[in-house]
């Protein structure tokens, strides 16, 4: 896989060179390319390696096994856990992430500079005279053209980080919610490049008196009008994804981002089948992932119970298939059709698939319009009726490295405590079953607004919690002292009716989690794409064009590529999934009626070691004290909460003895 990935990167590095240009011209003239045309050559060199990597990676993930006992040997600060940048537009970035970003930008700079140096050398006086251009005008035109090609390099990488459950993310053990920032970085760079690309052409057309090019749709050339369409769609998605808009108008961001279907289509119409096939590998894997998510989101699950933990916090328990395993600190997308048929919201899972085998619990902070409406609906719902929810997920990455540290420091802000609840539950389970060594100490620093949120702590106390030393330090920021603390009340639980036989509700994630099935789906979708595009290229395009690219419509060729991709994913990939599910039904499992209450809540809930009132924790002082006390220990620091809090924690973890792991669910 490493060799194949290195070869794929090398293709992009060599692409702008004159040596590669000579090789490419020689290869595409060979008669073996006639069946698929030059588009087939682009697919072979640029997209096939991606597909093969996905297939081999999925099989590898399925066959690989973790050690039964995870030791703490060999843990050291590494580039992946060292926060090299904690301020600025990149937010918190590790040394490894920063290195990859610099290398990616270097690839783009190299591509543009090499393209221009090669193309500038080929400008001849005869060409300038024939087209009535000045030298600087021709150079300006080349700059615009090659900026567009550099943007295509960005597009080749754009979809990898945004596919939930991606094979590549699982191979690298990069959480999807972290990989989102890579998608943001690449997207920003791509749109800046394409903005300059468009401006350069507008200037070129203006100075040469060819502004009509902007509204022309040419048959065999890349046309300005199609480029205008793809740019408008891209700008809409780009502007609504910026931080201020995404945080204040999340639904606007979410719905405009569904225009990716139109964006891919207009891009295919703009560049044609050849360049589209150069990036179709990432697009196909993303569309397959999205298709699997769509199928899964059609599944309905029963809500078992709702428990009001405090005035703003609710624990929601839903049914799950007994065979569904997920990692701690995973999240799930939930939709309540009775509240809103279109709105989907992510919530962190506070249960453990090892401990809570037949149900799944979420911690919901009720402070927004949708969550408040949901809270009121559940409080007033008729418990004799079945309450249903649509679910998608769970999504999460392997966190076995948690058990490799001597000491764990969890820093949470508000509802940021959710992932730590499931981490502690799973850690306790593994310790009880002698799968991991118990850490010397767990330190939980939790900042909350009000003291009535402390009832959430009872969720992290299984019956065998005495096996761990847990120091819980709570900071109540909006109360001045314990005298203002309201009397503790028993959390009220609403239990709903359920179906006797639960459907295979959220087991639809098998298409992502099952390595063999995922490999089969990728192969089927890719084979379907090759079959459809091969038929179209051989029997529609080639008889007209004969690989000259001078006759057949470029936009129609791009449309063929888009259609082939969709058919490959929906028809061939979907057919393979249907066949797999049909065969799987022959192996009928027993669907037990899910328990309605958590089986692991102790009769004596956890109480904080100390409660501090009136302020947030002063993290520099706190970490300075821990650095002195924990000398010689391998310390893992995990933070989940507001961005500013994570930045402060990251800055304290730049000391060599701390390894920093952010848990950021800002989707």
Image (cartoon, helix red, strand yellow):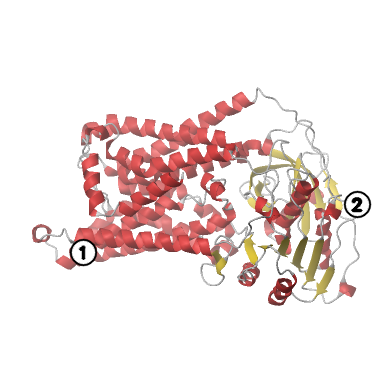
Nearest to the observer: residue 144 or residue 229: 144
Report the front residue among 192 and 34.
34
Judged left or right of residue 574, residue 456 is: right
Disc 1 versus disc 2: nearer the observer: 2
> Height in image: 429 above or below 534?
below
| Residue 604 spot, x, y in % from top left | 90, 55
Label 1, on which residue? Answer: 139
At label 1, counting other C-alpha atoms closer than 10 Å, the crowd grade (few under 14, some 14-19, many 20 or more) is some
Tell me what residue is drawn at x 56 percent, y 33 percent.
517
Q: In terms of secondary structure, where does tag 2 sit?
A: loop
The answer to whether residue 549 of the structure is visible from this angle is no
Which quarter of the figure is the C terminus placed in?
Answer: bottom right
- Asked if residue 329 can be seen in this view, the reply is yes
Residue 15 at x, y percent in the picture: 30, 52
Q: Residue furthest top?
A: 586
> Which element is circle 1 on?
helix
Q: Is residue 29 left or right of residue 128?
A: right
Determine crowd level at label 2: few under 14, some 14-19, many 20+ residues with C-alpha closer than 10 A: few
Residue 603 shows which numbered tag?
2
Dot 1 or dot 2: first in sequence order is 1
């Amino acid at each position: 896989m490493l060799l194949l990935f290195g070869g794929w990167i090398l293709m992009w590095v060599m692409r702008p060179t004159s040596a590669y240009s000579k090789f490419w011209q020689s290869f595409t003239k060979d008669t073996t390319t006639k069946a698929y045309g030059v588009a087939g050559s682009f697919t072979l060199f640029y997209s096939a390696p991606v597909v093969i990597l996905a297939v081999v990676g999925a099989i590898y993930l399925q066959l690989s096994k973790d050690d039964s006992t995870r030791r703490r040997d060999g843990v050291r600060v590494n580039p992946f856990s060292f926060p090299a940048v904690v301020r600025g537009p990149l937010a918190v970035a590790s040394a490894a992430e920063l290195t990859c970003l610099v290398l990616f930008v270097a690839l783009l700079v190299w591509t543009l500079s090499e393209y221009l140096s090669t193309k500038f050398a080929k400008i001849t006086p005869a060409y300038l005279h024939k087209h009535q251009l000045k030298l600087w005008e021709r150079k300006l035109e080349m700059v615009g053209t090659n900026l567009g090609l550099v943007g295509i390099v960005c597009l080749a990488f754009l979809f990898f980080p945004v596919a939930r459950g991606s094979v590549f993310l699982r191979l690298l053990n990069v959480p999807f919610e972290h990989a989102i920032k890579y998608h943001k970085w690449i997207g920003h760079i791509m749109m800046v490049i394409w903005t300059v690309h468009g401006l350069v052409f507008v200037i070129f057309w203006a100075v040469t008196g060819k502004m009509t090019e902007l509204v022309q749709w040419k048959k065999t050339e890349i046309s300005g009008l199609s480029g205008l369409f793809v740019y408008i769609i891209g700008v809409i998605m780009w502007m609504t994804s910026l931080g201020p808009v995404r945080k204040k108008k999340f639904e606007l961001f979410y719905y405009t981002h569904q225009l990716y279907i139109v964006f891919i289509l207009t891009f295919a119409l703009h560049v044609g089948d050849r360049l589209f096939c150069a990036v179709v590998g990432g697009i196909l894997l993303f569309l397959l992932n999205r298709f699997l998510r769509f199928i899964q989101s059609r599944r309905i699950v029963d809500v078992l119970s709702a428990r009001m933990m405090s005035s703003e916090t609710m624990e929601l328990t839903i049914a799950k298939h007994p065979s569904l395993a997920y990692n701690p600190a995973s999240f799930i997308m939930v939709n309540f059709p009775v509240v809103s048929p279109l709105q989907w919201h992510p919530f962190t899972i506070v249960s453990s698939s090892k401990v809570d085998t037949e149900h799944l619990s979420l911690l919901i902070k009720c402070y927004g319009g949708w969550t408040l409406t949901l809270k009121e609906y559940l409080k007033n719902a008729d418990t004799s009726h079945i309450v249903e929810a649509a679910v998608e997920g769970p999504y999460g990455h392997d966190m076995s490295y948690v058990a490799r540290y001597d000491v764990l420091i969890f820093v949470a802000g508000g509802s940021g405590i959710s992932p730590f609840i499931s981490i502690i539950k799973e850690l306790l389970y593994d310790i009880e079953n002698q799968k991991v060594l118990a850490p010397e100490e767990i330190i939980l620093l939790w900042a909350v607004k009000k003291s009535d949120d402390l009832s959430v702590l009872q969720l992290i106390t299984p019956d065998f919690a005495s096996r761990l030393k847990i120091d819980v330090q709570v900071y109540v920021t909006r109360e001045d002292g314990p005298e203002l603390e309201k009397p503790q009340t028993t959390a009220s639980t609403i239990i709903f009716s359920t179906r006797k036989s639960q459907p295979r509700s959220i087991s639809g994630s098998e298409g992502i989690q099952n390595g063999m099935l995922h490999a089969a789906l990728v192969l089927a979708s890719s084979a379907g794409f090759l079959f459809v595009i091969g038929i179209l290229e051989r029997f529609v395009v080639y008889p007209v064009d004969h690989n000259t690219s001078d006759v057949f419509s470029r936009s129609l060729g791009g449309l063929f590529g888009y259609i082939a991709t969709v058919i490959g994913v929906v028809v061939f990939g979907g057919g393979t999934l249907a066949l797999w599910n049909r065969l799987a039904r022959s192996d009928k499992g027993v669907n037990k009626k899910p328990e309605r209450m958590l089986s692991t809540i102790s009769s004596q809930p956890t109480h904080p070691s100390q409660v501090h009132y009136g302020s947030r924790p002063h993290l520099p002082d706190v970490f300075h004290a821990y650095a002195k006390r924990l000398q010689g220990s391998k310390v893992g620091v995990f933070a989940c909460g507001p961005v500013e809090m994570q930045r402060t924690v990251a800055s304290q973890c730049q000391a060599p003895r701390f390894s920093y792991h952010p848990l950021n669910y800002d989707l």
